[in-house]
Image (cartoon, rainbow, N blue to C red):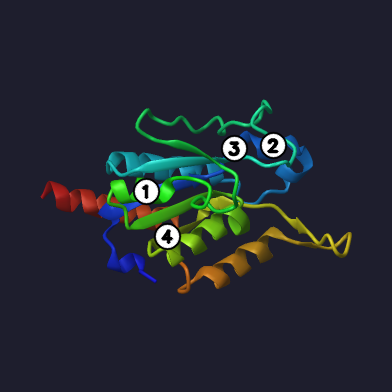
Amino acid sequence: MLHSKDVPISQSALLVIDAQESFKLDAKKWERRNNRDFEKNVTRLIEAYREAKLPVIYFIHTDEDPGFGIDHPLFRLMEFIKPRTDEPLIQKNTRNAFTSTGLSAMLLEKDVRRVAITGIQMEQCCETTARVAADLGYAVDFVIDGTMTFPIPNYDNPGEELGVDAIRERTEYALRRRFARIATVAQLEAELKERSKRAAA
């Protein structure tokens, strides 16, 4: 796999995956989410990528789950996200952001070889996108504090669940050095600022 250190951040794009109001339909589940700074952190990254004049691409997921149908009133991006006219919003119906979209062609057109992954849910659509991106040859920054998740029930053993801290730990262990660099918002902000300084020098 390509490593982030081998691809300059000038060839990076920010992917904001499924940050949509659909998740708020289940109020009890929403209250149990991790990363209460999710909205603030994703906003910081969007602003940093915009300032660096690098691509920002949004995704919205549709399936048969309540709230995810295209005709549902909650089937829309979260209120804090306001895409610009040159920032694509792509609808997908697979867990990863590649298989059911034209993302690969779009990234090729934009000369992108590195992707920063944020969004919901950490261990599902975000992690799956990271795995596919790595297998397709992209360097991947998995922005752990730019993702969010919820406890996962064990459908084979009712009453048992996997908590959000365990999900985060397992996601980091599964992705690290195999599929992605585990990154933070602050790390990417620093790289983007350093790139801007070099460009201005």
Whole-angstrom CA distance, mark 4 to mark 3, is 21 Å
- The residue tagged 1 is 105
Mark 4 vs mark 1, CA separation in Å = 20 Å
Task: Name the amino acid, label 3.
Answer: Gln
Q: CA distance from mark 1 to mark 2?
A: 32 Å
Q: Is residue 183 visible?
A: no
Residue at (87, 64) in percent of width and height: 157
Residue 110 at what x, y percent from top left? 29, 46
Which residue position holds label 3? 20
Kindly state the secondary structure of the residue where label 4 is placed: strand
Q: Real-space Cα distance between discs 3 and 2?
A: 8 Å
Q: Residues within 10 Å of mark 1 (few under 14, many from 20)?
A: few
Image quadrant in which the N terminus is located: bottom left
> In the image as oriented, which residue stretches furthest toward the left?
201
Q: Is residue 77 left or right of residue 138?
A: right
Residue type marked 4: Asp
Res 72 seen here: yes
Quickly name the residue at label 2. 24
User: Which secondary structure lies at badge 3?
Assistant: loop
Give the SS element for disc 2.
helix
| Mark with earlier residue (1, 3) | 3
